[in-house]
Amino acid sequence: MTTPTPAPPTTYPPDAPWAVLGDGRAVLVGSRCPDCGCKVFPALESCPSCGAASVEPVELGPEGVLYSRTTVHVGRRPFPRTYTLGMVDLDDGVRVTAQVDGGHDLPLDARVECVVGPVSGDADATTTSYRFRAVTGAGEGDARVERAS
Amino acid sequence: MTQPVWILGTGMVPFGKHQDVKLELLAGRAAREAIGDAGVDKGAVDEVFFGSSYGGPLVGQRTMRDVGLAGLPITNVENACSSGATALRDAVAAIRSGRMRTGLVVGADNLTRFAGGTIPLEATDLEVNLGVVMPAVYAMRAQRYLAETPAGPEDLAEVSVKARRNGADNPYAQTRSAVDRDEVLASRMVADPLTLLMCCPTGDGAAAVVVTGDEELARRHGGSVEIAASVLASGRYNPGYKDISVSELTRRTAAEAYAAAGLTPQEVDVFEVHDAFAIAELMYYEALGLCGVGEARELLADGHTARSGPQPVNPGGGLLSRGHPIGATGLAQICESVWQLRGSAGPVQVDRPARTALTHCTGGGITGLDHGACAVHILVAA
């Protein structure tokens, strides 16, 4: 008989897998395998690549490249009728899909950065999550040093 | 030697909006028709495999109760757009294992239950909660494909034009009218560059087949078709960068199917391809080996894949005309391919003699995967 594995100390995936930096931009919190280096987002509790039993948190972003995007015109509640989705290749080597501000005007391969803002809901109840916008130059200083707790 | 498996009988209801008919009834009609077409008594059925994505708990039992087959082993299969094809693969495996001699495979879904719009995806999925819907998944592929190949929106429109022209003749199709390129491009935008007429209609439908490993039954029937390959794969989890203008999952699944059947792509006479959105057909020409990367638009423009061409793709109009009641699609493709190989496809029969057919369905949108599942079958006239 084997001993059951104890429950992980935190919820997986975490409820708000991001951290807002001092300059207003955000990094995504994924996981990184200490054995093979595989980085994933959202975070997992083990490595899907090499099978290592434990992984460590890793900050991803805030900048990346807009790999593709489309403006959805058939949004249903709680989403707006029209919004833009994009696939973003974060500079750390991880791809994520999220809403993009003004994305229909951004060319493919544009530089974008992560922020936190509304993604669905209405005036009464808004859901906030990570999203992307064209780079603003906010990251000229060393954002990670100024990072808010 | 591998135990051969034959399709004996087919059954299908016309796809469309059937709000007034229960799913069990649609599925039951297809099932009874398949048993009748197989020329066997329903007592010959050893097991039932039922593919459905939104049919709910025990949809197979709910249907078989009314068909008079309750009591048999019934396996319910959910695998997104490949649910019906996955059920068929399980039936083939059950025959090859020696466990079952003759089986009934049914695929059915009714999307009118959702009152229009895009199909609901897994509510707990991270990206679904950011607004990802299936048209957007294909639209982002299309954006990248159009950026990396000579194809443009007018080529996407031509896919729909071919599908609707073929579907206009198909009594089983949900939409039965031809459209021209300008109409397709001018229809309302769903997710750019995909307009409404570049998206398959949602509706209700059911299709079924009877399969057997009994050579005597197959020989006596006269219209049996052998299943030369039955392959299923799932998308690989790749958290990093990948080229989405190439369908790795379809390419991988098809390669295994060609190898199993001992055929090259050029030796397949007719194809049923998962054209849920117009971009998909172009990408799948390339992934199925009909042409090289970026060459799909020429293949289409040359008429190579027209019903009158050397390798027709979706001669009955595909998903863009037939509609896509998720779990039914894989078996609808099988039914229409069997009819092509029998030469009984009537108004949608391909011009040149067809001895081999390939069916391909793939889909499902969850974070991190190209697609949830892909199933490819290759059929050979017996």
Image: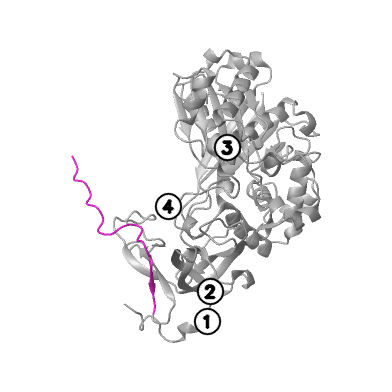
Is label 4 in a helix, a strand or a loop?
Answer: loop
| Of labels 1 and 4, the one closer to you | 4
- State the SS at label 2: strand
Subunit of mark 1?
Answer: A
* Secondary structure of the residue carrying numbered label 3: strand
Residue A19 inside the magenta-drawn segment = yes
Residue at left offset 53%, top offset 49%: B371
User: Start and end of the magenta stretch?
Assistant: A1-21
Q: How is the image coloured?
A: one colour
Please give the chain letter of the residue carrying mark 3: B
Q: Alpha carbon of mark 1 to alpha carbon of mark 3: how far?
A: 47 Å
Respond whether the residues carrying marks 2 and 4 are from the same subunit. no
Q: Contact, CB < 8 Å: mark 2 with mark 3?
A: no
| Badge 2 density bin: few <14, some 14–19, many ≥20, Cα 10 Å | many
Q: Nearer the viewer, residue B226 or A82?
A: A82
Residue B124 is marked as 4
The amino acid on which the numbered mark 2 sits, given as a three-letter code, is Arg
What's under tag 4, amino acid-wise? Thr
Local SS, label 1: loop
Q: Which disc, if any, is residue B110?
A: 3
Q: If the image is split into quadrants, where does the C terminus of chain B sit? A: top right
Q: Nearer the viewer, mark 1 or mark 3?
A: 3
Q: Are marks 1 and 3 in contact (CB under 8 Å)?
A: no
Query: Do tag 4 and tag 3 residues touch (Cβ < 8 Å)?
Result: no
Say if residue B310 shows up in the picture: no
Which three-letter amino acid code belongs to the residue tagged 3? Asn
Q: CA distance from mark 4 to mark 3?
A: 22 Å
In the image, what residue type sits under mark 1? Thr
Between residues B372 and B1, which one lies in front from this camera angle?
B372
Question: What is the residue that sits farthest to the bottom in this orientation?
Answer: A141
Labelled disc at residue A133: 2
Please say if A89 is above or below B94. Answer: below
